[in-house]
Image (cartoon, rainbow, N blue to C red):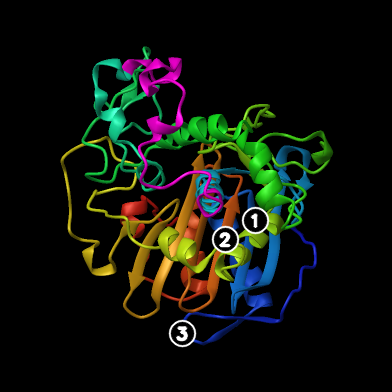
Amino acid sequence: MLVGMHGYGQTRHITKLDGGKITTAEIDTFIKSAMEAAKVQGVNLAILNNNKIAYVQSYGFRNKPKNALADTATIVYGASFSKAVFGYLIMKLVGEKVLELDTPLYHYLKQPIASYKYFADLKDDDRWKQITARMCLSHTTGLPNVRYFNPITNAEDSVGVMKIYFTPGSKYAYSGEGFRLLQMVVEEITNTKIHQLAKEKIFEPLNMKRTGYIWYESFGDDNVAVGHLNDGSIDVKRKRKEAVAGGSLVTTIADYAKFIQQVMQRRALSKKSYDTMLSPQIAIHSVTQFPPITQEITTENDAIQLSYGLGWGLINCPAYGRAFFKEGNGGSWRNYNINFRDKGISIILMTNSENGETIFQPVIEKLLGKTCIPWKWNGYHPY
């Protein structure tokens, strides 16, 4: 397995959660062996120590059939990393008094929510009046994850029904449609598309030149990853012209590490905004992260205080303290980021392989040590 790499403030060793050290040579050797064993075509890695970028590396291929290697400037699909960035953007807007977390969203709109075509199915259920920005960011709206997926039958729904499945704010159920609703509200009250807001307020200040919610021609076509599906086929992401707050982000490992560094260093937001964003809004008792919306619950993650903040999942490890995390899964794109805020240590893994998540647990435990990450709840099974 060949390696593509850009130097980025590289250190010779990384500090693990227990204070132990691992050399970057050991990291490279382990990841390449894990990729080979799991048949993962491409991996992008970033590690933060002391809340600062310590190591950024890309391994394998951006396009294996073309024998094209990845590097740290290769554009990859962020998938639901989009939601973490959007949550941060909303907290900036809250700080600017553009909106409030607990004001029902319909108060900001020119029409009732059910009057908008995308949400017209809600016309006979006025619980949409209860939905707030806080609920959207903490996945407690009661809306489904995606409207073309039936959360009851677990099957494709040709009609694409939008429905509120439980009283808003009462429990957690992962919902991309909640993010879509909040995006619609933000774009209406600011009269600005979210890709432009994110560019002005996050990407440009952080010099994230190869990141966007839409495709910019400045990205070029020379260094863009494709996805590798398990059946051997190639997944080419379309160049979006319309932003999707919950899932259209494209970025590079070097760029996304800058964003995580900003969050870990608690810069650009007030202390109150950071504390709110990374504080539990709802305890999570679902058996898995992406369940059909059911009544089935578990207490097996209570010991780690599994919960959701605003745009981020949260845990509290007995050994290492508080952490916030986000996944990004879409077909051949599998991403994971966890940030141990009390230790100043973060790891970002972005893969362009459908089976990429099979290396998450082995890699994180080798590079950082044993953690209390709820692997079963995440649905991650090691190769």
Residue 22 vertical placement versus 67 (above, below): below
- For label 3, the SS is loop
Q: Is residue 192 in the magenta section?
A: no
| Quadrant where the image shows the C terminus | bottom left
Which stretch did the figure color magenta? Answer: 93-121
Sequence-first tag of 3 and 1: 3
Q: Is residue 99 left or right of residue 24?
A: left
* Residue at the spot 54% in from the left edge and 57% down from the top edge: 37
In the displayed structure image, the side of residue 197 where residue 104 appears, left or right: left
Q: Which of marks 1 and 2 is in front?
A: 1
The residue shown at (40%, 53%) is: 380
Quadrant where the N terminus lies? bottom right
Q: Secondary structure under badge 1?
A: helix
Q: Distance between the residues labelled 1 and 2?
A: 8 Å
Task: Please name the residue that numbered disc 2 is placed on.
Answer: 348
The residue lying at 31 percent from left, 78 percent from top is: 318
Going by the numbered disc 3, the residue's amino acid type is Asp
**Secondary structure beneath label 2:** strand
Q: Are marks 1 and 2 in contact (CB under 8 Å)?
A: yes
The residue pinned by badge 1 equals: 256
- Can the viewer see residue 253? yes
Disc 2 or 3, which lies upstream in sequence?
A: 3
Q: Is residue 171 above or below residue 19?
A: above
Disc 2 residue type (three-letter): Ile
Mark 1 Cα-neighbour bin, 10 Å: few <14, some 14–19, many ≥20: many
